[in-house]
Amino acid sequence: MLEVRGLGIRDLVRDVSFEIGAGERVGLIGESGSGKSLTALSVMGLLPEELTASGSIRLDGRELLGVSEKDMSRLRGNELAMVFQEPMTALNPAMRVGRQVAEPIRIHGTHREPRKAAEELLDSVGLPGTSRAYPHQLSGGQRQRVVLAIALANNPKLLICDEPTTALDVTVQAQILGLIRTRLAERSALLFITHDLAVVAEVCERVLVMLDGELVEAGTTREVLTAPKHEYTRELLAASDLEARR
Amino acid sequence: MAARPRNTGLVVGLVLVGLVVLAALVSFLWTPHDPVKVDAAHRLLGPGGANLFGTDKFGRDVVSQLMVGARTTLYVGVVAVGIAAVIGTPLGILAAMTPRWLGEFVMRVNDLVLAFPALLLAIMFGAVFGADTLTAMVAIGIATIPSFARIARSGALQILSSEFVLAARSAGRSRLTIAVRHVVPNISGLLIVQASVSFAIAVLAEAALSFLGFGTRPPTPSWGRMLQESQELLTSYPRLALVPGLAIAVAVLGFNLLGDGLRDRLDPRLAARL
Amino acid sequence: MSVKVLRRLAILLVSVFAASIVVFLFMAVLPGDPAQVALGVNATPELIAKTRAEFGIDRPLVTQYFDWIGGVLRGDFGRSYVTREAIGPQLLDRLGVTLWLVGAGMLIAVVLAIPLGTFAAVRHRKPSGAGVSGLAQLGVAIPAFLAGIILVQIFAVRLRWLPSGGWTPPDQDFGDFLRGLVLPALSLGLVQGAVVTRYVRSAVLDTLGQDYLRTARSKGLRPGQALYRHGLRNAAVPVVTVLGLQLATLLIGAVVVERVFVLPGLGSMLLDAVSARDLLTVQGIVLVLVVGVLLVNFVVDVLYTVLDPRLRGS
């Protein structure tokens, strides 16, 4: 469903290729600066102005790189959705939560009553009755649920999560992960970026490992976490407390 | 990439300010003609020849007036900004270091002063004491105190919450020592930026006041008054207004660019937060 | 009305009261007495004494203050020491002219600054954006009276499109009123527009880097739509502050522009009163201007809480 071939962004990301099938949940791990987020942003077509991606990114066979801003914005929030790392700043402080959740529905015209649909979405992420609240009245975990509701609004084919739980404390992390697993439609694909191997083990079926802008290892979660091939993955495993938690 | 035009700004600012300062310094030693000598035989001469920018309606040399006028501009700016910095900075630091209610009070008084803009204050002073360079400088200075107090207070509040100040406090250093050793040196960059920006505002205010007849008195040359004196002759001799007008713009632009450039040189995050 | 607004209202009232005392004392403690100043050096002691009694200047300061401020609250600013006419009605008349001028100037400034500043921010890496920033920087350096002189030179003297000065009240001939207002309002508005453009640019630039704008894009909004729907409201918060401060500056800047265009506003009334040494009139005008500045600051603070929900008490 998503096919990335020879993706390059200056020397920050080099020759990255991978595929994600419908309904597949894939983890992308690596330390900060390894190019994980840039890879995700280039799929969304939201790279910073000064960067451009080369290679090929296809969604259901359609090329995404070099597509006009207008066509790309039709996909974003509809077939492609993204949850960001920092929930505290990801929402517009001057707009009520309900309107922010209703917006992707309104933009893409996917529901006759966006307001009502937004309230249902907020219910489904466990925030009933919050549609008239402003973001500053919610906690970090609650705000991340709102961001998740926005991302799930139109049942995207691909949901990208960029370290969605890193800024949250452990109990809240578990709630958000639970929501992602239960609320994401069966047929939707997930690209989950993290540096937390425990989270990968919990959520993902397959894992991609990035180092210094290159993809160094790929395989099923079990393979990569039990029999890592690359030296770097072994170091990652050794450094994590995954064993201890088991 | 984005930093390049800003750096150019700093350089251009330095050059423009340098130009004004140079003109003022040279005027102490030499001017092409006597700037205040009225010469009926040489009224309204065109540019070129013995008078580079010509002469005004009293036959005074425009270039010489411009050079001595730079002196007035800088003099007023230095004294006004000096008054504002010397009074405003300690007030701001005081407001940051004293108990909450006292700090609140100082800032409320500050807001009250803010309601008396420089021009209005100068006109009030003029009404009571008779207007001249001194009343203009003092009025502009007082009106500028609040901006220094504000910047000093917010800068000081930030320094005071930093770890090295907490360390100094726990080592038993007195408030005064902390203010002098830690706060002042750390906010000096901000104050220099503020001084540069305030200087530009002071130049504009002095020009406006002299234009209205509430600033520098004749015969001392001043750019604002040169403009006012040439207003009636604008149709036939536009250069007489444009030359001092341009001088004012050069000085203001110079100090503004200098201030902006210096601000970017400082920690930009700190500047943005204040 | 929230507690915050009430608190701010209380601060406004205290500030106005304090400002009126400052203005009063400033005029009262001057060297020499106002009757002497108004009548000139040749006045006989008898005449001065008579005038002092007539205007009540011989009473204690406290009585004088409360008499004055009590009158002001009823719209009575007293009688001029010089012309012996009531100050209030003329002051009100002149204030109208100044408000038209300031209002029109502000309108021009805002209409120019919001699109130009936004443009300069969105295109800040491109030459066109840098060009607008540079022009704004240049505009800030030009005094309003110089702008006025240049505008008169071009549009009144050379092209003869518009009058070089003078004032027609709007209820007399609205066309003449507008024609007379254009150049003075432009001289104020162009320069202020440059100042505000710079602030709009930096506010929008700040907003462009915010995470919520990226969220908006990820919903499917195009860059322009995202900025319009999510950015401008947030950028408005710092800009409104600046507009308030600038409105205060304009109120005072009008003094100079009124002189250039010979407009019968509060500024020219103030300057005339100072030349005539008519201190009670000066006192009244200064009070009106200062209260105007305080009022603008109050409105800005209240607007602030309207624009930024985070500042509303919960």
Image: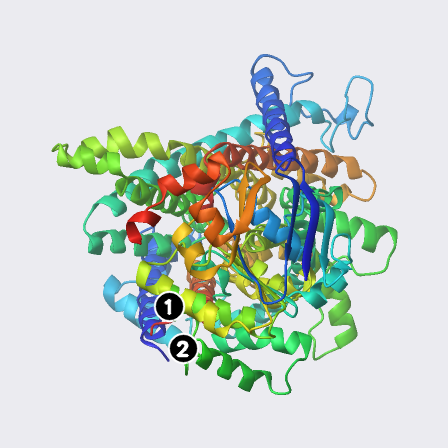
The tag earlier along the polypeptide, 2 or 1, is 2
The crowding category of the residue bearing disc 2, from other C-alpha atoms within 10 Å (few below 14, some 14 to 19, many at least 20), is some
The crowding category of the residue bearing disc 1, from other C-alpha atoms within 10 Å (few below 14, some 14 to 19, many at least 20), is some
Q: Quadrant of the N terminus of chain B?
A: top right
Residue at the far right: name it: C159
Could you tell me residue A235's position as x and y percent?
Answer: 42, 37
On residue A175, the disc is: 1
Could you tell me residue C36's position as x and y percent?
Answer: 38, 54
Relative vertical location of residue A177 with respect to residue C92 in this rendering, above or below: above
Residue at 19% across, 30% down: B177
Residue at the far top: name it: B29
Residue matched to label 2: A126
Could you tell me residue B132's position as x and y percent?
Answer: 48, 38
Question: B233 and A5: which one is in front?
Answer: A5
Relative vertical location of residue C38 with respect to residue A237 in this rendering, above or below: below
Question: A210 and C17: which one is in front?
Answer: A210
Residue C260, can we see it?
no
| Disc 1 secondary structure class | helix
Give the residue type that dot 2 points to. Gly
On residue C273, the disc is: none
Residue at 61% across, 52% down: A41
Relative vertical location of residue B66 with respect to residue B232 in this rendering, above or below: above
Residue contact between numbered discs 2 and 1, judged by CB atoms under 8 Å: yes
Residue at 56% across, 54% down: C203
Question: B48 and C29: which one is in front?
Answer: B48
Residue at the far left: name it: B172
| Disc 2 secondary structure class | loop
Q: CA distance from mark 2 to mark 1?
A: 10 Å
Mark 2 or 1: in front is: 1
Give the residue type that dot 1 points to. Gln
Could you tell me residue C263's position as x and y percent?
Answer: 66, 61
Disc 2: host chain: A
